[in-house]
Structures are given as C-alpha cells and as structure tokens.
C-alpha cells in the first residue's frame, strides 16, 4: 500500500521543504501541499524547494483550483515542476473551498471543472486550445505529460473524474460499500466519455486522528470544524452521502453533540483512521483487504484554526509503526 500525507505551509518555505524531506525518510510515497494563497506562501514554490531536497517522493498541490489559478497557468506550473522532478509530479484540481472563499468567489461548477481539466490535459499534451477567441499552446513540453487528477468529494465530481481526469483523490471513506459506490460513479463518468478506467489511478483521502488515547481520537464526529459547520460537513455535505451508503444515516441538519460515542466510533471506522497507531494500522490493513484500497492520502483532522499545524506526530507514527506494518516501501 502506498501512503501519502498532507503537509500545510505552516512554516517558512525552506523549513516546510525540509519537513517534506523528513516525510520521504519516514517512508511516505508522496506529499500533497495545500494551495491556499491567503497563507502568504505559495504551494508551487514549496513543491519546487521540496523537489530539490527529495529524490523519490511524488509531489503535488492538494489541491489547486481553476478559480484562483487560470488553466493555462496551472498547466505551465505543472510542466515547470516536471522539469525539476521528472515523473515525480501530479497536478490535482478541485472546485476550491477555503482558497476561493477567501477571495469571495464560489466554487467551480461541474461544467467549469470539466473545461479546466480537459484544457489542462490538452495543453500538457502539446495541443492548441482557445481562450476568449485566442488560440494558444505551451511552447515547452515534457516527455511525459504531468497526470491531472481531480480531488472529488461529491458524487457528481466523482463521475466527472471518471470522465475527464487521469486519476482521482476520492473523499469517500474506507468502508467497502462507500468505495464500491464511488467506483460505480467513476464507471458512469467513464462510460459517458467512452473511455476505460484500466489505467485510472485512485487515491483515497483518509481523515486521520492519531492519539495514544484511542477513544478520544474517535470523538472527531462530535466536533465542529468552525462555528456553524460540523467537521463531518468539511469540506462539504457530501461526506454524509458516502456515510449513508454504509447505513449510517445522519440528518442534513444534525449537530455534532447529538452523536453518541457508539455512533461516533462507527462513523470513524467507516470514514478514516482514528485511534492509536496500532489501531490505525489494523484499519488500513482491513481497508486493503475489504475494499481493495492500494493508495491512501493521510489527511490529519483539524479545526479551521489548526489547519496549518504540521503533522509531526503523524509522521513519527507512520514511520515507526504503520508503514513498516503495511510493508510499504
């Protein structure tokens, strides 16, 4: 099983790049760094510095969007990183959440995402595209076009990923019924485009709370991400859709305090990794066996205020216990 991890730009860029190098030494396969321009630190500069300090990690923004960055700009940035770290880069694109909200813009629609992903892939293949009546292309290309992934949480975005992207980061949980439902959505999208998913890469975003106190870690569903938004509705209400696929039916207007400890533990088991390092290792092994999951993206849980804290504890736990236990390289 391959294991990636989210790293925020919570330190000055050179220090963040050094931290990413410790992720490679810990045995992670990849690192995704958020694209939040309001942090005052740029993800692509961070990834470029990290590329120079690593030799094996796959590096990518987690996640860029076509609202704050034009499709031509995203294609150019992806190719630039490809020149620094050949075959160690992927571009991930999503509708946007905090980044677009911080400039007072709505998320990209399904149609806007379709246009963006198709356009970026065409540019990276050397094809000409048209913007506002002007035909243009990238003047420099890589031997291998950088793969373009979609980060998809809702059913329609999952379908779109199957239709137009090279792969997807899926926020659907680990439960086999939810994973099966997501794969059906990918197949619907692929059928719409008349394409095969044989080479389509699936990475499962895995919310993670690691703690020496397992029961405390499993209180995550009873918490708020920020005032007015339960953590289970971050980044969207779509989390409830996938939980319902597993038989966990929460009302649209639920409040975290209404969830009892037993139901919280059930939600945690379906949704991600919550508990001690040993418990999380056991859950990942079960996800591999029950759901056929081969690649996860560890997303440490946090409130909005704590979103830029570096995952030091998680990196140590995966280095010392979880990655060796999985047999990951």
Image (cartoon, rainbow, N blue to C red):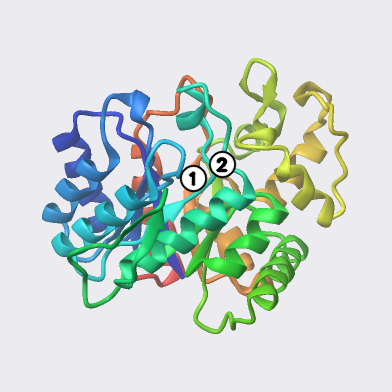
Residue at 53%, 62% in the rendered image: 168
Q: Residue 59: where, in percent of width, then height?
A: 30, 56
Q: Residue 235: where, in percent of width, then height?
A: 60, 36
35 horizontally vs 166: left or right: left
Return the residue at label 2.
Answer: 108
Q: In front: 41, or 310?
A: 41
Image vertical order of residue 164 relative to residue 169, above or below: below
Residue at 21%, 69% in the rendered image: 141
- Quadrant hosting residue 36: top left
Q: In front: 302, or 134?
A: 134
Q: Is residue 19 visible?
A: no
- Quadrant hosting residue 215: top right
| Mark 1 closeness class: few <14, some 14–19, many ≥20 residues within 10 Å | many
39 horizontally vs 152: left or right: left
| Mark 2 closeness class: few <14, some 14–19, many ≥20 residues within 10 Å | some
Return the residue at label 1.
Answer: 299
Secondary structure state at the residue bearing disc 2: loop
């Amino acid at each position: 099983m391959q294991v990636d991890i989210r790293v925020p730009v919570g330190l000055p860029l050179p220090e963040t790049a050094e931290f990413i190098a410790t992720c490679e030494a810990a045995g992670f396969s990849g690192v995704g760094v958020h694209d939040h321009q309001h942090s005052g630190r740029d993800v692509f500069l961070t990834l470029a510095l990290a590329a120079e300090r690593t030799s094996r990690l796959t590096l990518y923004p987690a996640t860029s969007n076509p609202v704050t960055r034009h499709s031509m700009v995203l294609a150019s940035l992806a190719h630039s990183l490809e020149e620094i770290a050949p075959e160690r880069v992927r571009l991930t694109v999503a509708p946007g959440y905090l980044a677009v909200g911080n400039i007072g813009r709505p998320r990209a629609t399904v149609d806007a995402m379709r246009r963006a992903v198709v356009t970026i892939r065409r540019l990276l293949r050397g094809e000409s595209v048209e913007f506002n009546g002007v035909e243009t292309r990238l003047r420099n290309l890589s031997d291998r076009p950088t793969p373009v992934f979609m980060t998809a949480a809702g059913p329609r975005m999952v379908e779109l990923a199957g239709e137009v992207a090279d792969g997807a980061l899926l926020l659907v949980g680990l439960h086999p019924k939810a994973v099966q439902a997501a794969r059906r959505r990918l197949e619907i999208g692929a059928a719409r485009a008349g394409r095969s998913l044989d080479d389509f890469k699936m990475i499962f975003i895995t919310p993670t709370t690691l703690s020496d106190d397992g029961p405390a870690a499993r209180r995550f569903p009873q918490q708020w991400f920020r005032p007015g938004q339960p953590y289970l509705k971050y980044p969207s209400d779509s989390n409830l859709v996938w939980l319902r696929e597993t038989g966990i039916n929460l009302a649209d207007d639920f409040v975290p305090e209404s969830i009892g400890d037993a139901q919280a533990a059930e939600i945690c088991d379906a949704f991600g990794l919550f508990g001690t390092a040993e418990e999380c290792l056991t859950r990942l092994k079960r996800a591999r066996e029950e759901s056929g999951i081969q690649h996860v993206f560890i997303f440490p849980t946090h409130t909005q205020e704590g979103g830029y804290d570096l995952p030091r504890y998680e990196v140590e736990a995966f280095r010392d216990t979880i990655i060796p236990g999985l047999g990951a390289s």
